[in-house]
Amino acid sequence: MEPITFIVTALAAGAAAGLTASAENAIKEAYAGIKALIQRKFGGVDLAVLESKPESATRRGVVAEELTEAG
């Protein structure tokens, strides 16, 4: 799996897990950590588009494209 694909998949999984009441604290903390790291390194990447619909392949593609362009 390419690094960008891995990152976007992790973001989508974290966003989806965060939407359920039974999400474990470890998952929430890991998601918050990776999200904070991405926002620090790639501030222009809008993660809200993925968070609002994490199961969407199209939205995953948009975030992957933005991360790739951001470097």
Image (cartoon, rainbow, N blue to C red):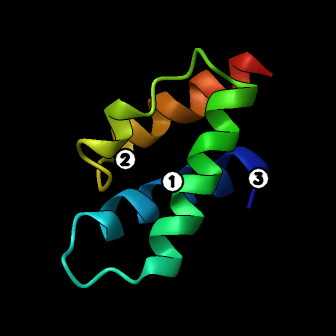
Regarding residue 9, the answer to whether it shows in the image is no
**Three-letter code for the amino acid on which mark 1 is drawn:** Leu
| Residue 48 drawn at (x, y percent) | 35, 32
Q: Where does label 3 land, which residue?
A: 2
| Badge 1 element | helix
**Three-letter code for the amino acid on which mark 3 is drawn:** Glu
* Residue at 58 percent of width and 14 percent of height: 44
Any mark on residue 41, and which?
none
Mark 1 and mark 3 in contact? Answer it, CB < 8 Å: no
Q: Where does label 1 land, which residue?
A: 11
Q: Is residue 27 above or below residue 29?
A: below
* Residue at 43 percent of width and 65 percent of height: 13
Camera-side residue: 20 or 2? 20
Q: Is residue 67 above or below residue 29?
A: above
Relative placement, left or right, of 46 versus 33 is left
Question: Could you tell me which quadrant the C terminus lies in?
Answer: top right
* Residue at 33 percent of width and 31 percent of height: 49
Name which of mark 1 and mark 3 comes first in the sequence.
3
Q: Is residue 38 above or below residue 69?
A: below
* Residue at 51 percent of width and 32 percent of height: 63
Q: Where does label 2 land, which residue?
A: 57
